[in-house]
Amino acid sequence: MRYKEALANASCPNCGGPAAIGEMSFDEHHLRVENARLRDEIDRISAIAAKYVGGKPGAGVAVASAAYPPLPPQSSGRSALDHLGMPSMFGGAEFDKPMVIELAVAAMEELVRMAQLGEPLWVPSLDGETLGEEEYARAFPRGALGPKSPELRSEASRETDVVIMNHVSLVEMLMDVRQWSALFSSIVSRAATLDVLSTGVAGNHDGALQLMSAEFQMPSPLVPTRDTQFLRYCKQHPGGAWAVVDVSLDGLRSAARVGGHFRRRASGCLIQEMPNGYSKVTWVEHVEAGDDAMVHDLYRPLVNSGLAFGARRWTSTLKRQCERLASAMATVPSSGGDVITTAEGRRSMLKLAERMTASFCGGVTASTTHQWTTLSGSGAEDVRVMTRKSVDDPGRPPGIILNAATSFWLPVPPSRVFGFLRDDSTRSEWDILSNGGVVQEMAHIANGSHHGNAVSLLRVNNANSNQSNMLILQECCTDTTGSYVVYAPVDVVAMNVVLNGGDPDYVALLPSGFAILPDGPAGAPDAGGSLLTVAFQILVDSVPTAKLSLGSVATVNSLIACTVDRIKAAVVVSPGDNTGAAANR
């Protein structure tokens, strides 16, 4: 009788449930075991994070144990955070670490489920997979961040692709803010790691947890950037798959904070190892964005559809950049003569081109750090200018630099615009720098499966013999979501150092170029119209303290207007006209 009574009151030391067999359902048993596993994981991370709170490791574990009772199941309609108080978390630089850890764990669970579930949660469409909002509300009654805000617009998409990078290297790049921002330089304009709560277990990033900030961009001054702070949590799952999840901290602090117009719900990727060094990546992008009044009408369909910042753009960029990295590591010689004779020279030239393209993307957006001034113009073709002072920057010439950009619509498919702008034989039709000279490709490095992805070194043989020949470094890249043609004049002596394997970081560059996007959500590279951004960076005075003259601004304004007119004349063919430059492309 004593044994029977003691057994009835006994509880499992791991999960806290009844110890008697048959006293609980299988589902309840499974849930309690899972909760116990999560508590163990939280305790481990809290012990590491305790030093950031200021207490002893033992105290950190005690706090975590007290703060994490068994989580209610999703079907209860409660968020994983509802049973905790919501104190003000951002007093200065401090915040409630245990609560943040739980948010990360809940976001990871949500991401993995969203990456694995099919219909009706995800609905196939021409532009990938879109989220069924009603099914999401049923499957995730509150989600990691709580209910969706009625004041914000939901954007959710999922994309799966195979990339040429092994899963270990990919996780490493995603968890290193410098490598991550370089990998996605066309999307991420600024990024920083604000705090590291856990570095993960020894030897890999399993359990790594970071607090980060980032600004996401579109390659046009007509689309405002999206600025956010978020947690990034990395976890290896049974079977060897890895997941990296981002989630905004907005659910843990006042909605009245600055920048409350954008928050990142559980977003990120599930990475599965494949043979021969490849990885299968399933990307989920799930955000809430506010009023799009600051987005120009030309870009509003692209932004509202979710494609501007959606999963397809992330996976397409990732795939293209992985091919680029694979090309940089290859030992295949370049074509175009004996200009590049070593693998070191090849890598140095690709590294220089990478910095050039990243600089172009970061300099053409409507970032909060940029103060654009609109010059007189008409409609969308207003030219926006911005000045910068370059001092002690080995990658830029010293002095006053003038950035100028404009975006406009073309009734021509993106593939045709891209083909025209990267064609050396027709460069003189739009490039005023070429000045009617003959453009010769001295070196060509293919860096992707698409024949349009390449880095080139061009020489302009001027028709005027009194002018010295000019070298131009150019990178062309394209994927399903957009294309770029970026170029910069380069010093002959400095370029020779690079071609011999020297450090490319000390080569001064001022990149100019083009960003080409489809004009709507159903746009394909070979159909529909194009949204073209033209941008120039020009050194207007070599003295950083000099004043910018109105004459310099007027000259750059005329340069852009002339370039735009030349492109329109070359690629836009009137109905029934088969003689234009675009007709044969």
Image (cartoon, rainbow, N blue to C red):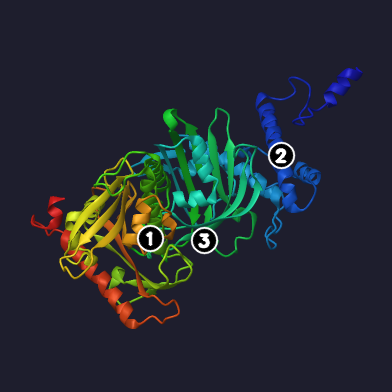
Q: Which of 197 and 157 is in front in this view?
A: 197
Q: How far apart are marks 2 and 1 (CA)?
A: 43 Å
Q: Can residue 267 be spotted in the picture?
A: no
Residue 90 lies, in percent from the top left, at 67, 60
Indicate whether 145 appears above or below 561. above
Q: How crowded is mark 1: few (under 14 residues within 10 Å), some or many (20 or more)?
A: many
Q: For the view shown, which residue lies furthest in the right direction?
A: 2
Q: Residue at x 72, y 52 (%)?
A: 52
Give residue 541's position: percent from left, percent from top.
37, 77
Query: Mark 1 is on which residue type?
Result: Phe
Which element carries disc 1, helix, strand or loop? helix
In contact (CB < 8 Å): disc 3 and disc 1:
no
Q: Which amino acid does label 2 sit on?
A: Arg
| Element class at badge 2 | helix
Q: Mark 2 points at which residue?
A: 44
- Between circles 2 and 1, the one closer to the viewer is 1
Query: Residue 360 shows which numbered tag?
Result: 1
Residue 158 relative to residue 432: left or right: right
The image quadrant where one finds the N terminus is top right
Q: Where is residue 555 in the image (x, y as percent from the top left)?
A: 28, 77
Q: Is mark 3 on a helix, strand or loop?
A: loop
- Residue identified by numbered label 3: 261
Disc number lying in front (3 or 1): 1
Looking at the image, residue 245 sits to the left or right of residue 186; the answer is right
**Label 2 crowd bin: few (<14), some (14–19), many (20+), radius 10 Å:** some
> Is any part of residue 50 visible from this angle?
yes
